[in-house]
Image (tube, coloured by chain):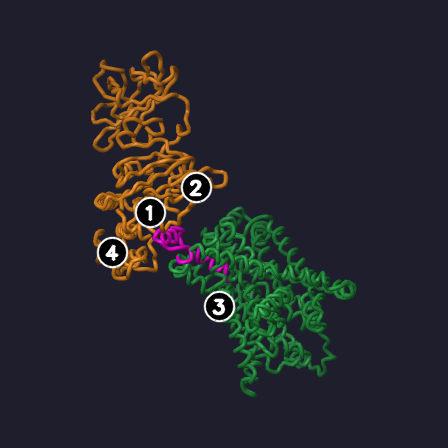
Amino acid sequence: MTDAASTATASRLVVSDLSRRFGRTLALDGVSLTLGPGEILAVLGASGCGKSTLLRLIAGLDTPDAGTILVGDRRVAGGGRHEPPATRGVGLMFQDYALFPHLTVMANIRFGLAHLPADEARRVARERLDQVGLAHRAESYPDTLSGGEAQRVALARALAPRPRVLLLDEPFSNLDAGTREHVRADTLAVLRRDRIGAILVTHDATEAVAFADRIALMHRGRIVQCGSPEALYDAPRTPFAARALGEIIEIPGTAAGGRVTTPLGLLPRPDALPEGEVTVCLRPEAIRLGPAGDGVPAAVLGRAFAGPRLRLDLAVAGLAAPLRLHLPADAVPGDRVGLHLVPAQAHVFPPARESGDEASLN
Amino acid sequence: MAAARGLGWAGAAALAALLLSPVISLGLAAAGGGGELWPHLAAYVLPQAIRDTALLLAGVGLLVIGLGTGAAWLVAAFDFPGRRLLEAALLLPLAMPTYVVAYAYLDLMHPLGPLQAGLRGLLGLSSPRDLPLPDLRSLPGCILLLGFVLYPYVYLPTRALFVMQAGTLLEAARMLGAGPWRIFLRIALPLARPAVALGTGLALMEALNDVGAAEFLGVRTLTVQVYATWVNRSDLPGAAQIALVMLACVVALVGLERLARGGRGYAGNARRAAPSLRRRLSGWRGGAALALGAVPVALGFLLPAGYLAVEAWRRIGGSGVPDALGAQARNTILYASLATGVTVIVGLLVAAAPSLLGARAGRVLIRAAGLGYAMPGTVLAVGLLGPLALIDSGLFEAGFASLSVGLGTGAALVVAYALRFLTVTVGASEAGLARIPRAIPDAARMLGRGRFATLATVQLPLAWPAVLSGGLLAFVDIAKELPVTLLLRPLNVETLSTHLYGEAARGTYEDGAVAAVLIVLIGLVPVTLLLRLDRNALTRRG
């Protein structure tokens, strides 16, 4: 505990080959990831994908069946070792904050500072409380706090013992949309300023993109892709990964020679792609609308108002269902238009259905 | 931390051993008793005791099922003036220990007692011989008495099920044109089967446990025989052999209860709000319903309790509070308080065992904690004699003779009480701990507390009310307890219950009424708690 309190807050966290089985389900299947000093990583996945299990194993609230966890250069789990949560130097912020209802805000924050002399503990706690702007609530009880206040107290409580790594379990999901954005920004600012490495578990892609340096995409107990938000958006390795980070339009295609033929036009064939049927995932911005006669012909079937953009349903030869696009352009049913593909935003995948194929987040 | 865990394991192992020891020691004592007793028991004692016990249980079972489900249906399916009051009053007999009700009725129904005398006066007869009434001191009399005080065990879960669970289904049956009788027989009763089975099981355990009523009424059940064999004939192996037969009865009862539930759980506390299905009864029908429902309340509580109150009042008015009563009340409170303290602390630790020692070991320990309650008091007491003597001689060898837990020191009584009622405090603490979201203790662990420190600083302060209410229930159960107290109390120590037993066994009724009233008052505490809980649950339903 003392060395966790005295050394610098930033530290590496290395998770290798972590597995955890509950009865017959393999909740975690050989997960490896690294968190650099001061880095913020989001673990993105649907409920039941194993992301909370991963968090509990790192926290020390659960024991892995296989694999190791290193905090700094110290092994805290694996190889017969299981350090209790208290000595790992890892903090955890719970989804519903888990503030102790029988203790004041101040006593909640001091709870993790029992190893310090009383006045020192009071000083540190007050400092943390100031930092989240809640000094005036020190003597309140948790049930009188608003959602945003409770979240900030939970953050202050988790950070008070100066953990090397902070784990956040869907910490913004209980806040209403308006509060969420600025609580998220405040939390991020605190973490950045103190250079605290953090792992955020979430099922919300927007949140992961807004919060994290890197995103680890989880599905059925495995990490299917890990990288910067841009990398995941621009170069998804599977249709599942493509779907996870934003809107996707899926169309069929055929790979032959150096090209992939789709109802919306031709794309270059990636090197590793075998010939035959393929799945093409398009970001909405991969489709450009032009005048009739320019590009692949399409007919406007429907038109609906959708905020700053219009929603158009387009009939295209070779597609079973109409193409639904959100576009700034205007057109009315009956119009004829031409479509162009932007190859950089089109992702071609082999038809072999890998595990995450049918699933999507949310 | 590791040391605390080691200590936890050692404590758990010791407790499990203590909980199992009565069964093992009974087996050993019965086997070691030599052959000369067994033929006598097998020929003269057991056949009759088993027959009477079986008849008693069968009769009480039928009576509590009839009274319990009937009363539950009456207040759940009909609305009439006074229904809410009746709903609560039907629980009152729970406050009546079986030996108290038997004590009261024996006096009340005595040929020279007020009831028969009044009846003769009414008919203009002068001698008891002119009005031969069936004697209460018989098997049927015992069945009637036990049935009228034990039916609330069936009434309580069955009514909860009728009110909370079955509402929509009963409504649907009514929409399909079924009348109240058909709904009761075809829908409500089959639906209520798990609740009825559960309640009947509990009532029969109480009947099997009873030593006072059966003995006063001259019914030689197994329990009475265990007590008589040991106390009157000083024959421990013989008592152990009968106790083993009783254990077999308990196992059979549990099996029957499972069977009757048909593998279904009892889900009486489901939170589904049900529409009210009560049919309004007005005029003479409403009055008749109220009168009908009031019969079990009157026979199971009002009449005996009222009689005891009058007798106690007369006794105090005549010669003041009996001298010995103060000492008896003090003893009762002393032993019950000591045992409650032990039971609450051990119960809390057992309830927390899944998080302290791991889920599997914790579950096993919680199961084991129910053993003491499953054993009738006489069985537990006889079974504990061997283990306690063993611990005593161990302490003596080790030079701690003064720490004796042996018979006659009161420590044995406290241990036996704690084992018997451990499941009460375990259950309450478990419920209290389960209401705390898992993240709360996890958060304390993340902030540097060990498992025991988390229990002490976070879980206990939050579960405190539930733990306390468990302690209150245990205290009441212990204060009313008779068979264990009779067998294990130190020499010359009388509690309220043993005093009452002595009075009734001798056929003297001078001071008993005051003690009986005190016991009933103690027994009313959990009933009022139950009523408050019930009221909350029912009013929240709207």
Q: Amino acid at mark 1?
A: Val
Span shown in magenta: B425-453
C-alpha span from label 3 to label 1: 39 Å
Q: Chain of mark 2?
A: A
Percent position (x, y) of residue B87? 51, 63
Q: Which residue is mark 1?
A: A90
* Among the two numbered marks 2 and 1 on one chain, the one whose residue lies closer to the N terminus: 2
Q: Is residue B426 magenta?
A: yes
Image vertical order of residue A259 relative to residue A100, above or below: above
Q: Dot 3 lies on which element?
A: helix
Q: Main secondary structure of the magenta part?
A: helix
Q: Is label 4 in contact with label 1 (beta carbons under 8 Å)? A: no
Q: Can you tell which quarter of the image residue A341 is in?
A: top left
Question: Which mark, residue A124?
Answer: 4
Assess disc 3: are there few (<14), some (14-19) or many (≥20) residues with their C-alpha within 10 Å of its C-alpha: some
Q: Which residue is mark 3?
A: B341
In the picture, one chain is green; tell me its letter: B
Residue A147 visible in the picture? no
Assess disc 2: are there few (<14), some (14-19) or many (≥20) residues with their C-alpha within 10 Å of its C-alpha: few
Give the side of residue B165 with respect to residue B36, left or right: left
C-alpha span from label 2 to label 1: 19 Å
C-alpha span from label 4 to label 1: 18 Å
Image vertical order of residue A98 relative to residue A282, above or below: below
Q: Which residue is mark 2?
A: A79
